[in-house]
Image: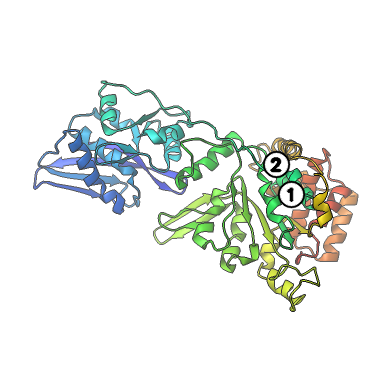
């Protein structure tokens, strides 16, 4: 007789069904696990044996074989402990087979039978719903998994609780979704003195999810501006929150099962490796570009990142997906993020100040920003100079709109875009392409004449031409205008053809 339990194996944010088969046959006593398990899965036999012993359950003197099907799919992680234990208990007749087979289970076992929280409870719950099964998980993972309404989630503290639940002795209540975490105490945009043009550019970038580059001397306020970006971004929609939380679940970043409606804001250090930025390492975990999905990836000291890391950003920026390739597998993660970069104008940082610049000026500026390749620079929709703030400006009272006021305008513009793009698969103006770009972002006659003149004068690439159209559409949305006019195109062009880099 073969007893069966079900669990999942993770391939990126996808959870593949795995059937855990348990067979007890005559022969020399042995306990083996087959089906391409990794080291953590192979060690499950010792944890399961100890947990059952702690419950005073002895394994029979038979040959026990656990098969993880499909056998050619790599199995990684300690979450296979619980389904292996369930299949064993079903084979021993302790648990009813039909109940075990109607459940997707995942969880790590301690030697005393306690269930330890594991990564990936949220995507596992999604997979259970698709399979029309319930989900059994550790108590520490229940609040996260319970966000999926389409399946019944049972969260148990120990293997003994699982047995008592399935045998009807002490039924467990379905788990409840964790609280929605919300960012509080975010810095206000009014704290930034001066830099009105950079503030405006940041508002446009936030409204349309446009990629944004700031170049300025040290201490001019680039990082200060970026830190205030989360305060003006609209909250995640329900679908976006679920998408983002599935990635964060795999990375172990969900706090006690709470799902946040705040957009991610990731700021990796410039010494980060390619695997840390793009994804990879053991288990091909998501990188910073995927952890920033539906949010912001802020890269300070942008030219200081390794050239190979910067160049790998080009494809994810365009496609909104990243493929982590391995010899035996290819794992795809979503990564539709807003790239915000900050850079000094040169190595010493004071290219514009003759009294403080190094002896290599102005050639050092070309060399330093030249670390950002032309194709990558071409992908920034807005490029803004952030000049130094004078001492007299610092003594002036705060000016400009608060983060709350700017956030209201940004959210209104995003709602207009969502309504316009409903049913197209696109969510913001930064996604406009093909016929949708011509339908929704084409400027009026005067605007098109200006755009054509600028394209000829500055040699805009086709990508640059289209990105100006997208930014102009966003500016029109912030202005509450139905059509893209010449003034909107002019402002969009001003963010594109500055003195920062080739257009």
Residue 267 x %, y % = 59, 53
In this image, 141 relative to 446: left or right?
A: left
In this image, 59 relative to 223: left or right?
A: left
Height in image: 129 above or below 436? above
| Label ID, residue 202 | 1
Identify the coloring.
rainbow
Marks 1 and 2: in contact by CB < 8 Å?
yes
According to the picture, the residue beneath numbered tag 2 turns out to be 232
SS at circle 2: helix
Q: Residue furthest right?
A: 446
Residue 182 x %, y % = 59, 35
Local crowd size for mark 2, using a 10 Å CA cut-off: few (<14), some (14–19), many (≥20): many
Compare residues 58 and 152 and report the one nearer the observer: 58
Which quarter of the rendering shows the N terminus? top left
Local crowd size for mark 1, using a 10 Å CA cut-off: few (<14), some (14–19), many (≥20): many
Residue drawn at (76%, 67%), measured in percent from left and top? Answer: 502
Residue 240 x %, y % = 58, 39
Residue 50 x %, y % = 20, 41
Figure disc tally: 2
| Residue 57 showing in the rendered view | yes
Height in image: 46 above or below 304? above
Q: Image quadrant of residue 80?
A: top left
């Amino acid at each position: 007789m073969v007893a069966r339990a079900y669990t999942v194996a993770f391939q990126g944010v996808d959870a593949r069904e795995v059937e855990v088969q348990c067979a007890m046959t005559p022969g020399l006593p042995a306990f083996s696990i087959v089906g391409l398990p990794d080291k953590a899965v192979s060690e499950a036999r010792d944890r399961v044996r100890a947990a059952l012993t702690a419950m005073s359950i002895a394994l029979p003197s038979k040959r026990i074989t656990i098969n993880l099907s499909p056998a050619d799919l790599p199995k990684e992680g300690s979450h296979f402990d619980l389904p292996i234990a369930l299949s064993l208990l079903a084979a021993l007749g302790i648990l009813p087979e039909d109940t075990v087979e109607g459940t997707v289970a995942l969880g790590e076992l301690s030697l005393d039978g306690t269930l330890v929280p594991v990564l990936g409870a949220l995507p596992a719950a999604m997979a259970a719903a698709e399979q029309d099964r319930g989900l059994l998980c550790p108590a520490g993972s229940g609040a996260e998994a319970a966000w999926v309404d389409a399946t019944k989630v049972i969260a148990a503290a120990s293997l003994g609780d699982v047995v008592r639940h399935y045998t009807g002795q002490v039924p467990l209540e379905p788990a409840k979704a964790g609280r929605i975490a919300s960012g509080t105490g975010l810095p206000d945009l009014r704290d930034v003195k001066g830099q009105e043009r950079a503030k405006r550019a940041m508002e446009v970038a936030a409204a349309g999810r446009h990629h944004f580059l700031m170049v300025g001397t040290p201490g001019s306020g680039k990082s200060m501006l970026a830190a205030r970006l989360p305060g003006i971004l609209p909250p995640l929609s329900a679908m976006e929150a679920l998408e983002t939380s599935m990635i964060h679940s795999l990375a172990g970043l969900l706090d006690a099962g709470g799902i946040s409606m705040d957009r991610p804001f990731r700021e990796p250090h410039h010494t980060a490796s390619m695997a840390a930025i793009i994804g990879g390492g053991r288990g091909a975990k998501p990188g910073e570009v995927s952890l920033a999905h539906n949010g912001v990836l802020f890269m300070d000291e942008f030219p200081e990142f390794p050239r190979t890391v910067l160049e790998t950003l080009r494809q994810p920026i365009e496609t909104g997906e990243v493929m982590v390739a391995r010899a035996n597998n290819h794992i795809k993660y979503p990564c539709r993020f807003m790239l915000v970069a900050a850079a000094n104008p040169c190595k010493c940082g004071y290219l514009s100040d003759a009294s403080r610049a190094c002896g290599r000026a102005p050639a050092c500026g070309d060399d330093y920003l030249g670390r950002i390749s032309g194709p990558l620079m071409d992908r920034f929709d807005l490029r803004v100079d952030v000049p130094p703030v004078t001492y007299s400006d610092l003594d002036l009272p705060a000016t400009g709109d608060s983060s709350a006021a700017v956030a209201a305008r940004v959210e209104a513009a995003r709602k207009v875009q969502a309504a316009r793009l409903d049913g197209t698969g696109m969510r913001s103006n930064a996604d406009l392409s093909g016929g949708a770009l011509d339908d929704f972002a084409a400027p009026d006659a005067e605007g098109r004449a200006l755009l054509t003149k600028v394209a000829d004068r500055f040699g805009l690439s086709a990508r640059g031409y289209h990105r100006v159209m997208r930014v102009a559409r966003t500016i029109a949305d912030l202005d509450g205008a139905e059509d893209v006019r010449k003034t909107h195109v002019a402002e969009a062009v001003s963010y594109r053809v500055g003195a920062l880099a080739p257009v």
